[in-house]
Image (tube, rainbow, N blue to C red):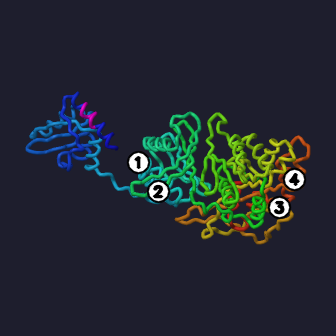
């Protein structure tokens, strides 16, 4: 508390004492503060809301607040009948200062969260830890532990009796703690204030928290998260998507691209114009892929501008514009910002997400007029995204020629090589594998299946689930001559299946084909692939 605020509280307490006809003591002037631990126990000090301030020559002076009852004061007078008992008003902050001396806060030991087989024991200990610390420390601790476990996001979910906290690790949610409703309210108020969202809103909200927190153990923690909130019947649920501030992780070499896939990407993003889209659902690694492309293109000779909601990582040498989504309107829209950006003569433009027809048309026009445009798009596959774009561009041959590459992807868990166990596949698994391999492009060599061994996850105390890290399964649709002719054919509609079949003829691996090859190679399990790919 600042000196001015403390002075205001003391003056207010003095005025209340005068109105009540009682003496007043400014405890900030009592130095040193003597503790009389034999008079009253710590629980009694809390229950009675009194502090013994002075004991001398048969006289006791108790400090009381304006919430201390007359019954309490009468009881103390009778209890200490051998003394002359007096009372004086003290401020609430003065009372709390004394209580910190009588009952010092316990030292908080921040233990690391581990995803192990002893889940219940750890959930209980983490829950107890969170109840001991203040809201900012709770947030900093959860973010620190999420980074420690390579989690992508933190889920705070309200339930009838309590609040559940879970981390998404390698695409799967793991429970780490429960919070009582009272403590959740403290935490959610701090999160809402830092993220500039309302705790009483009746609609979903988005926010961004970027702050530095000094925890109780002296550590400084940078909290940088994207905030998504939604009202539920039990309260406001929150998802915090973590931003990793390490530029080195945005590197094309770390994306797990095959030599053929890397050749395609390098060839296309080196061109001065065209549209490159990365598609997939939320949490499929689209932003990481796009940032890795962007990072490889940053030079002093190029002007690069991004339009993002929000800006997740700041790249030196790149002009980045944050777009805030307004509920129920298009204020500050991507399309408006994109048109303004194009007047700044950029070489490369990154659009965080193509969300509507106007943004799609503007992005395609930019790709036609000498700009390399990188963007994300929500679609289930590369061919599905192309059918949606076809509806927008209405078989316009100019727009079709602007599309260079559509990369669809999903993230699946990678088997822990030290734990994975070999087994002979069942007839069902062999039939499914053969069915998929029979659809491979002519240019892709079919792997032999004789004596095939697949792998399933093992288990250990340190890693009970048998997976470690994630890998991407991808499909890369490039605009070939045959595909262009198909899209330019005057028809009422062209299905995603038709587009996909044509792309496979031209050499495209689908995500399920790429995934089954990774299953055969022992990188992931059959079950994991079909958990992610329907």
Residues drawn in magenta: 10-15
For image coordinates 26% across by 50% down, the residue present is: 101
**Separation of disc 2 and disc 3 at Cα?**
46 Å
Residue 134 — which label?
1
Q: Report if the CB atoms under discs 2 and 4 are less than 8 Å apart.
A: no
Q: Give the mark, 1 or 4, whose residue is nearer the N terminus.
A: 1
Q: Give the mark, 2 or 3, whose residue is nearer the N terminus.
A: 2
Q: Give the mark, 3 or 4, whose residue is nearer the N terminus.
A: 3
**Separation of disc 1 and disc 3 at Cα?**
57 Å
Element at badge 3?
A: loop
The picture places residue 350, in percent across and down from the top left corner, at 69, 51
The picture places residue 480, in percent across and down from the top left corner, at 86, 56
Instruction: Give the foreground label among 2 and 3.
Output: 3
**Separation of disc 3 and disc 4 at Cα?**
18 Å
Residue assigned mark 4: 483
**Separation of disc 1 and disc 4 at Cα?**
59 Å
User: Quick one: 407 or 435, which is closer to the camera?
Assistant: 407
User: Quick one: 104 or 460, which is closer to the camera?
Assistant: 104
Residue assigned mark 2: 122
């Amino acid at each position: 508390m600042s000196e001015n605020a403390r002075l205001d509280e003391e003056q207010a307490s003095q005025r209340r004492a005068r109105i009540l006809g009682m003496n007043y003591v400014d405890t900030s002037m009592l130095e040193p503060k003597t503790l009389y631990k034999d008079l009253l126990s710590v629980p009694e000090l809390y229950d009675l809301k009194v502090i013994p301030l002075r004991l001398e020559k048969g006289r006791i002076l108790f400090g009381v607040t304006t919430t201390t009852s007359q019954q309490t004061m009468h009881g103390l007078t009778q209890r200490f009948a051998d003394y002359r008992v007096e009372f004086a008003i003290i401020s609430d902050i003065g009372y709390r200062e004394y209580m910190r001396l009588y009952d010092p806060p316990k030292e908080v030991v921040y233990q690391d969260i581990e995803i192990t087989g002893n889940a219940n024991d750890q959930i209980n200990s983490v829950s107890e830890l969170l109840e001991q610390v203040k809201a900012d420390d709770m947030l900093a601790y959860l973010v620190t532990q999420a980074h420690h476990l390579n989690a992508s996001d933190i889920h705070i979910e309200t339930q009838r009796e309590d609040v559940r906290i879970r981390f998404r690790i390698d695409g799967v949610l793991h429970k780490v703690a429960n919070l009582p409703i009272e403590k959740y309210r403290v935490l959610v108020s701090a999160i809402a204030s830092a993220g500039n969202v309302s705790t009483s809103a009746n609609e979903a909200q988005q926010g961004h928290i970027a702050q530095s927190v000094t925890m109780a153990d002296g550590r400084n923690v940078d909290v940088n998260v994207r905030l998504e909130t939604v009202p539920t019947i039990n309260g406001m649920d929150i998802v915090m998507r973590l931003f990793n501030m390490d530029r080195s992780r945005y590197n094309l070499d770390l994306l797990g691209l095959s030599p053929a896939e890397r050749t395609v990407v390098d060839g296309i993003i080196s061109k001065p114009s065209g549209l490159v889209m990365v598609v997939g659902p939320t949490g499929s690694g689209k932003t990481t892929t796009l940032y890795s492309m962007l990072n490889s293109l940053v030079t002093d000779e190029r002007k690069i501008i991004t339009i993002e909601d929000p800006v997740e990582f700041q790249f030196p040498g790149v002009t980045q514009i944050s777009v805030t989504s307004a509920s129920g309107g298009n204020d500050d829209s991507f399309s408006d910002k994109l048109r303004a950006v194009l007047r700044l003569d950029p070489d490369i433009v990154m659009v965080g997400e193509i969300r509507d027809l106007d943004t799609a048309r503007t992005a395609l026009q930019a790709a036609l007029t000498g700009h390399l445009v990188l963007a994300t798009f929500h679609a289930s596959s590369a061919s599905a995204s192309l059918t949606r774009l076809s509806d927008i561009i209405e078989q316009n041959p100019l727009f079709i020629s602007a599309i260079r590459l559509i990369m669809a992807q999903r993230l699946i868990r990678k088997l822990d090589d030290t734990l994975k166990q070999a087994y002979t596949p069942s007839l069902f698994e062999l039939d499914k594998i053969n069915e998929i391999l029979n659809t491979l492009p002519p240019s892709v060599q079919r792997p032999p299946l004789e004596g095939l061994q697949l792998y399933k996850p093992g288990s250990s105390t340190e890693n009970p689930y048998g997976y470690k890290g994630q890998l991407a399964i991808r499909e890369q649709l490039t605009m070939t001559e045959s595909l262009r002719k198909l899209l330019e054919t005057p028809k009422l509609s062209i299905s995603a299946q038709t587009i996909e079949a044509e792309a496979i003829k031209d050499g495209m691996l689908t995500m399920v084909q790429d995934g089954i090859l990774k299953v055969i190679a022992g990188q992931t399990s059959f079950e994991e692939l079909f958990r992610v790919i329907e």
